[in-house]
Amino acid sequence: PSGIESGAIQDEAFTATSCKDKNSLPHLARLNNRDGAWCALECDRNQYLQVDLGEVTKVCGVATQGRPSFREEGGWFVKTFTLSYSKDKETWKSYKEYGIAKAFQGNTDPEGVVKNMFKVAVNARYIRIRPQTWHNHIALRMEIY
């Protein structure tokens, strides 16, 4: 694991296109965090959560969860997402398999952890997760491997 869940990656390493409120800040997107999750203000495909791993690292996969114990019917979670990565925060590449941007299968409930391992590892410092479909609202907790 990259250190997102453990807290080794600092809060300042997380950024996002938007946040719903103070209980939805980007740094709350740590896997198994009980105090919330990142929740986008708007629900559209332009939203993303970004994390700075601190240095260029071999990235082999990602695990995701939705927002914990939320009362709305079925909770909030991301059902599918794409992932992009960068070494320098300027040049971004979409993660691809067989030459096509990979649409990862995400969650089917807010609490379960879904781990997606890459067929081919990538070298990256920055990771962006871009939700494509969601249940009720975009909400995410994650770890990078």
Image (tube, helix red, strand yellow):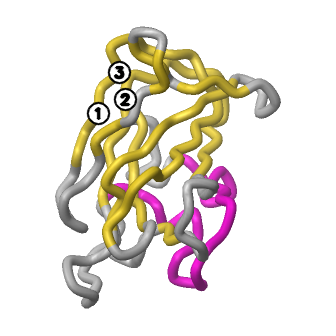
Mark 3, other Cα within 10 Å: few <14 / some 14–19 / many ≥20? some
Which residue carries the number 1 mark?
116
Kind of residue sitting beneath label 3? Phe
Residue 58: percent from the left, percent from the top?
A: 50, 18
Secondary structure under tag 2 reads: strand
Quadrant (top left/top right/bottom left/bottom right) for the N terminus? top left
Kind of residue sitting beneath label 1? Asn
Q: Are marks 1 and 3 in contact (CB under 8 Å)?
A: yes
Which residue carries the number 3 mark?
118
Residue at (51%, 47%) from the top-left corner? Answer: 8
Q: Are marks 3 and 2 in contact (CB under 8 Å)?
A: yes
Residue 13: percent from the left, percent from the top?
A: 65, 50
Does the magenta segment cover residue 109?
no
Which residue carries the number 2 mark?
61
Secondary structure under tag 3 reads: strand
Q: Which mark is residue 18?
A: none
Residue at (66%, 35%) from the top-left corner? Answer: 54
Q: Disc 3 to disc 2, how far (Cα)?
A: 5 Å
* Residue furthest bottom as drawn: 71
